Amino acid sequence: MVHGRPEFTGHIEVRGLTKRFGSFTAVDHLDFDVEPGRVTGFLGPNGSGKTTTLRMLLGLVRATDGTATIDGHRYADIGNPLTVVGSALEATNFHPGRTGRNHLRVQAAVAGVPDTRVDELLELVGIPAAARKRAGGYSMGMRQRLGLAAALLGDPRVIILDEPANGLDPEGIRWLRGFLRQLADEGRTLLISSHMLSEVEQTVDDVVIIANGQRVAQGTVAELRGEPTAYVRTSDPDRLSQALRDRGLAVAPSGRGLRVTTEDLAVVGDVAHASDVAIHELRSEQTHLEELFFNLTESEEHRNRNLARPPGGAPVDLPPPSGPPIDPALLAEPAQAAQRAQSAQPSGAPDHDGDLR
Amino acid sequence: MTAAVRAELRKLFTTRLWWGMAIAVLLSGAAFAVLFAFVFTSDAVRGPQAAAAPRTDAALAKAVFTGGLQVGYLLTLSIGVLTIGSEYRHQTITATFLAIPRRGRVMAAKVVSLLAVGALYGLLSLAGAVGAGTLVLTSKGVAPFADTSIWRTLALSLLVLGLWALIGLGTGILIPNQVAALLISVAVAWIVEPLLGLVLALTDWGKSISPYLPSRATSAMLESTSGGFDGRPITQLSWWAGALVLIGYAAVMAGLGTWRTLRADIS
């Protein structure tokens, strides 16, 4: 089923995109592509330049250098852009005295869309009655749904959502996930920004991860995860690992057990049985994407420039806010770490040559 | 472009601002018309103290029918400030520029819609003023429509309100804080600038400047005479020169605002 205007396929291309605010480089020579029919997660910690990038793509912020185009066109050069690109940037941008429905009617007037479409969309995002009340009293979740309806108004090929899951309850997030999947299956291009990988991990096909305005990773979720592995704990690790290697599997010790590069747990079990060792634990192990995300975005050269660094130059040992196991050494002297953070001074952007490309 | 104008008008008519303003414009038009009609036809303004009071039927009618316009243009000035100020304040400007990335077109649509809204409020003001004023004037034996130049004044009063709305539009952009923009623009237009005009008129060199102030140009445009501190009528421009001066102010303010809007990053 063809949606929107046929002259657009919905390919987003970002090349060398740069934005400097004075001496501060918010976005630094960013390159990435977003393909139609897929949900692409645009990830990075707070302050990494995601919103600025999206705003440059949408012609709201002027790029210092580089280009961001949709099928080769700058956003501002697309006639009636709402029918090509739908976007929801912040959940807050509604006039509190105007009803949600009227907010959409204002946009509909520009896009040349009839008011009946407005009511259809309100039905679709599940707020038909509430949208007739003034937006000042809306909850965050309602604002998100209204923003989503606004983005879909012109039946666009490309849908760009900035932190769409913010403020949604778990039921709402599940609904959103299914909804986005359906939109992508219809052949649309979806670009979803988030500062939480776990929030979009189950939704996205591709990810672009940025830190300090630079790309640190791009690929499919499967590529980022790497090869599937199995974790096995046994009575005789040496014997089992030898037997597994004889079967041509890569084995590495992992904690008290072994990590085997395979997604087939049965093979591991069979080999253990054949070599007469007892299995204490056997499970498939996935690379924890959240951990990967932090490794990428919090590694020394990509450490958040918004966090302070001590005068000596060594980064402050701030543990990541959540997610992966925290090195106990970091927690040894929290008071000292806090003290150092307080006396720390901001410094220039660090070097970036360790990008995963 | 018509779609952009329609969107701008929908923005205005989907909040409560417009009908509150409409009631105020209608009432002030009627109230000032009645007040001026009684005052100017009373014996109190027959003495030499009131040389600036209108004497002829035509002058009386103009003064009475446009009596509420000073309040009216302060209101449309506020609408002009709010039309852009609330977009920045509530960040709806993002949605506006996403729908129409050619920002010059957005600003042009705002100008057209504000002129239309000014004319609409002008009609409301005149409905109140002409309705109530005619009753009082005819009861006092004045024939308000005897001189046809009254129609020109009535037509121009529609333009006056639109032009002041454009001055507000420019102010709303140049002063980014909406509340500050509102307070400053109303205070200047209502108190500072008219007083400045009167003070300037006392000096020899100021006499040649004061007719070009916005409020003086507005009176000139409407051909309503007003008195200075000494009670004598202040010299003012002819109606067309006053109109050109006020159009000039509106164009400069809206132009400056547009120029700033075209360049700004919206974040």
Image: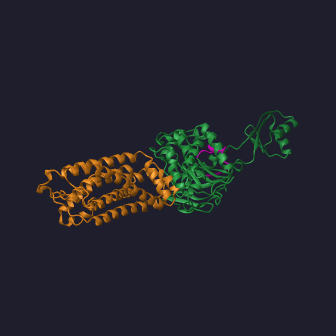
Q: Quadrant of residue B194?
A: bottom left
The residue depicted at 56 percent of the width and 44 percent of the height is A119
Q: Is residue B175 visible?
A: no
Q: Which residues are magenta?
A: A195-209
Tell me the green chain. Answer: A
Q: Is residue A204 magenta?
A: yes
The residue depicted at 51 percent of the width and 49 percent of the height is A105
> Residue B227 at x, y = what percent?
19, 58
Colour that chain B carries in the picture:
orange
> Residue B101 at x, y = what percent?
52, 59
A277 relative to A44 in the view: left or right: right
Q: Is residue B165 visible?
A: yes
From the viewer's side, name the closer residue of A154 and A23.
A154
From the viewer's side, name the closer residue of A132 and A215.
A132
> Residue B70 at x, y = what percent?
28, 53
From the viewer's side, name the closer residue of B133 and B72.
B133
Q: Quadrant of residue A331?
A: top right
From the viewer's side, name the closer residue of B133 and A17.
B133
Q: Is residue A217 magenta?
A: no
The residue depicted at 31 percent of the width and 65 percent of the height is B245
A320 relative to B50 in the view: left or right: right
